[in-house]
Image (cartoon, rainbow, N blue to C red):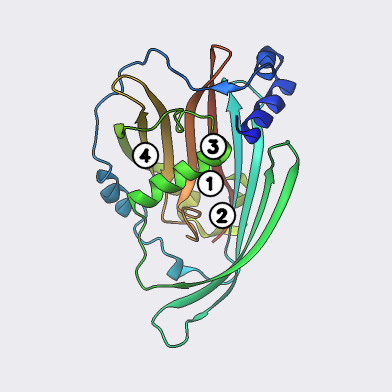
């Protein structure tokens, strides 16, 4: 079993006594009776949704001193407290034309504070320079791959990583809506709400399920929920496009199913 996942459950059990059995043995793949998955959809449909949701968001718009700040937490069996897992802070420290090209060169500092497989906190500081082309888009492939990698880093012993080979992947229950949400408290407390019109963030709310099949009847499922916007400084991967990203999935311990909900959410930004 992935040591990081085991460490997560150990830490959860230390805080939530009803889950003490999670300390006894390793996690195994779930093979349970499934509720209907719901209507299937072509993942290419996500491209149109994402294009609209992130219209205008581009690293080409990044300016000096812009910043985004995210936290990540995991809740086990919907019990409190949630477990704080990581922090990401990205700051733009330089912007200039890329010599001899029509691109823009952007440098930013990325501070990543995270809980390792033993429950200890680690700090990784990186500084990267990117030549940003004149056209960049958020695609379904980026959304699905980034999300899958995020959850895979949480644990290899999870609903998205079947024990056997995956025969195929299906996508279900696509729901899309739009609305305005309050920004995090840190942004609200900035002068003029950090430049947000009406102190609100316009988001596209996107949810869907991904089922990975090991045979004709057995599958594992991850339920995804995204709140996406074009009003934040858009940097690498989905940082700056996401206001919130949650993944819900089951893990089985000694015959008992436990539900994990991994969420990454915006906590501050300098627009």
- In the image, 77 versus 64, the foreground residue is 77
Residue furthest out toward the front? 164
The N terminus lies in which quarter of the figure? Answer: top right
Q: Which of marks 2 and 1 is in front?
A: 1
Find residue 86 and report its image quarter. Answer: top right
Q: Earlier in the sequence, mark 2 or mark 3?
A: 2
* Percent position of residue 38, x then y: 28, 24
Question: CA–CA distance between discs 2 and 3?
Answer: 24 Å
On screen, 83 above or below 237? above
Q: Earlier in the sequence, mark 3 or mark 1?
A: 1
Q: Tag on residue 263?
A: 3
Circles 2 and 1 in contact, beta carbons < 8 Å: yes
On screen, 6 above or below 150? above
Q: Tag on residue 193?
A: 2
* Percent position of residue 100, x then y: 43, 88
On screen, 208 above or below 48? above
Residue where numbered disc 1 is placed: 183
* Percent position of residue 5, x then y: 62, 31
Question: CA–CA distance between discs 4 and 3?
Answer: 14 Å
């Amino acid at each position: 079993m992935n040591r990081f996942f085991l460490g997560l459950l150990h830490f959860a059990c230390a805080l939530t006594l009803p889950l003490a059995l999670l300390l006894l043995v390793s996690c195994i793949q779930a093979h349970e009776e499934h509720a209907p998955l719901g209507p299937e959809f072509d993942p290419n449909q996500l491209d149109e949704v994402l294009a609209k949701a992130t219209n205008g968001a581009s690293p080409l718009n990044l300016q000096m001193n812009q910043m985004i700040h995210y936290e990540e937490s995991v809740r086990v069996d919907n019990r409190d407290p949630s477990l704080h897992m990581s922090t990401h802070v990205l700051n733009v420290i330089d912007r200039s034309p890329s010599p001899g090209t029509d691109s823009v060169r952007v440098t930013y500092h990325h501070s990543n504070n995270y809980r390792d497989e033993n429950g200890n906190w680690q700090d990784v500081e990186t500084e990267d320079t990117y030549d940003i082309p004149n056209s960049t888009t958020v695609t379904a492939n980026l959304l699905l791959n980034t999300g899958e990698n995020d959850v895979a880093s949480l644990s290899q012993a999870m609903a998205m990583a079947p024990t056997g080979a995956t025969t195929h992947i299906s996508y279900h229950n696509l729901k899309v809506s739009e609305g305005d949400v309050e920004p995090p408290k840190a942004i609200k407390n900035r002068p003029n709400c950090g430049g947000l019109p009406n102190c609100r963030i316009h988001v596209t709310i996107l949810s869907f399920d991904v089922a990975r099949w090991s045979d004709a009847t057995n599958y594992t499922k991850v339920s995804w929920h995204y709140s996406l916007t074009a009003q934040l400084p858009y940097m690498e991967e989905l940082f700056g496009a996401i206001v919130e990203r949650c993944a819900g999935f089951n893990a089985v311990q000694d015959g008992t199913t436990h539900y994990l909900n991994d969420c990454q959410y915006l906590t501050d930004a300098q627009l």
